[in-house]
Amino acid sequence: MKINVLVRVVAVISIFFSVHSIALPEISPYKGLVLAQGANEGELREQALQQVLIKVSGNIDVNKLDESKALTKHISSILSQFGYQQIGNARFYYALFDSRKINKALVDMQQPIWGETRPKPLIWLVNEDRQITSEHMINSSQDSSISWGLTKSQLTRGISAQFPLIDLDDSLAIRASDISGRFYQTIANASKRYDAEYFVLANLVKTGDGKSQLKWELVQYNAQSKKSKVLIKQTNRGSKSYVMSIMLSDIADYYAKQFAILENNGEKLTQELNVKNINSLKDLTGLNSLLDGLNAVDSFEIVYISEHQVKVSVTLKGGLMSLKNALNVQTHLQKDLSSGSTFFYKWKP
């Protein structure tokens, strides 16, 4: 009996460390991925659905709704694909759900839909050794607790982060003291090469009780005005895994408020967009593809084309702010400040 208990304990510890050392692939918000351990397939399928409902709605409490609980009784009707997937040394169960059916279920619940607009924040983290955490440190899980904290939020919230390379260019551009001192312009200049509109300044230190404290800020940088805006400023305490996970989860909450759409079932708003620098069929096709992929857009129609500019009439699912937020984070669009109007942009091939 004691031997059997010992075997189970060793197995759990083995899985714990194997999960902590994996790097997850990019995962669709409509795909649930749960560790295949200690649960039958029916339970794993329900966990995957609950994960997807949170990721797509942006609402961490969505599964408390009676309608969400009722949906679990009809999983087979909304399931597109399922199976098992080996990632590193860990075995996962995955379930891919029909995006249209998930969206309809959330609309019926009067819940928002958070589409693919999920910017990766660039995290400038000064770790406990007073070093800037690099992409290599994260990918190689040099600190497995930090990596696992990020992985948990990637799984449950559908958001991931990027870290700087800390190569020669970064080393010449930025120091740990710039991050600790919150020198926003210096950080913004160093972030340009990563094309990140959102970046995080964070300091991780040990506390007297053997746990960790993470002081962090989410910052949005406007390259045209060269101004930085602090969006979130927080201090979290707990295990390293917890503070990293809660940071990314709080960022997901902020993004969901900006980019998730609560669809208007009444008369829909329309808005005209003006886009300059459309110089080829390729540019026009790119603009069409961009608008077609925006969750904020119900439909659109090109109403005018000149030699270098197009006007597009856009019908919205939600409000104007949702459209504005979605457009402002697109890498191929740049605000046209010379126009003095909100929905004027320049195309960036």
Image: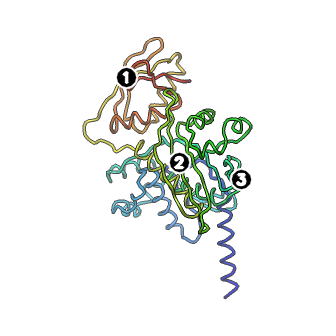
Q: Name the image quarter holding the C terminus.
A: top right
Image position, residue 122 (x, y; %): 58, 43
First in residue order: circle 2 vs circle 3: 2
Compared to 295, does 338 lie above or below? above
The nearer-to-camera label among 1 and 3 is: 1
Report how far apart the C-alphas of labels 1 and 2 lie in the structure.
35 Å
Q: Name the image quarter holding the N terminus.
A: bottom right
- Of residues 182 and 271, the one nearer the viewer is 182
Q: Which residue is mark 2?
A: 28
Compared to 262, does 62 lie above or below? below
- Of residues 266 and 22, the one nearer the viewer is 22
Secondary structure beneath dot 3 equals: loop
Q: Residues within 10 Å of mark 2 (few under 14, many from 20)?
A: some
First in residue order: circle 1 vs circle 3: 3
Q: Residues within 10 Å of mark 1 (few under 14, many from 20)?
A: few
Image position, residue 193 (x, y; %): 63, 33
Q: Residue placed at 56% from the left, 34% from the top? A: 185
Q: Which residue is mark 1?
A: 341
Q: Is residue 11 visible?
A: yes
